[in-house]
Image (cartoon, rainbow, N blue to C red):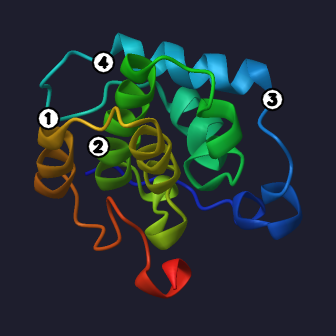
Amino acid sequence: MAVDTFDPQQFDPSRQSQSLDAGLVADALHAARDQVSGAPEVSLSAEQVSGLAALVVHAGWSAAAADLPADDVTALIRLFTLGESQFSSWQAGSKSAVIKLVRVLKQRGEMPAELNAWIKANTSNRFLPHGDLMDRL
C-alpha cells in the first residue's frame, strides 16, 4: 500500500458543486482505459494519482457520465474502486464517484449484475456500490 499526501482542498464543498472539466474527465477515462482488465491494482504515476484524487469525490460525475458509453462508465467504476483501496488520497467513503457512476448505469438499465459483485469483492468501503442509506431516504 502506498502512502500519499492529503489535500484538504479536495474535500472543499464549494468545489464539489462545480461541473467536471472535460479535460479532467478525459484524463480519468484515459487512466481507466489503460488499466489491464482483471488486474488487482491500478498502475498510475504519482502525478496521475494526485491529479485524479479530487475526482474521486467530485459531485459532478452524474452529469459528466450521462453521455458516456456504458463501457467507459464501467472502466471508471473499476478505476475508482481499486484506486480507493490503493491510494490514501483517494479515500471517499459515502462521497465516492463510484456511487454516482453506478447510479447512472442503473438509471439507464445498463448495470451488469457481475459488476455489483466485483465492486464488493474489491473494496473495503462499506458504502460501495449503493451509497449511504441515509442519503437515499
- Disc 2 crowd rating (10 Å Cα; few below 14, some 14-19, many 20+) is many
* Amino acid identity at mark 4: Gln
Q: CA distance from mark 3 to mark 1?
A: 28 Å
Q: Residue at x 45, y 56 (%)?
A: 99
Q: Residue at x 55, y 27 (%)?
A: 48
* Amino acid identity at mark 3: Asp
Q: Which residue is mark 3?
A: 21
Q: Residue at x 56, y 56 (%)?
A: 5
Query: Does label 3 or label 1 sit earlier along the sequence?
Result: 3
Q: Nearer the viewer, mark 4 or mark 3?
A: 3
Disc 2, SS: helix
Residue 90 % position (x, y)? 48, 53
Q: Quick check: 134 left or right of 129? A: right
Q: Quick check: 104 left or right of 80? A: right
Q: CA distance from mark 4 to mark 3?
A: 22 Å
Which sits in the foreground, 53 or 55?
55
Q: CA distance from mark 3 to mark 2?
A: 23 Å
Query: Does label 4 or label 1 sit earlier along the sequence?
Result: 4
Q: Which mark is residue 82?
A: 2
67 to 120, vertically: above or below: above
Query: Quick check: marks 2 and 4 in contact, CB under 8 Å?
Result: yes
- Disc 3 crowd rating (10 Å Cα; few below 14, some 14-19, many 20+) is few
Q: Which residue is mark 4?
A: 35
Q: Which mark is residue 40?
A: 1
Q: Residue at x 58, y 28 (%)?
A: 47
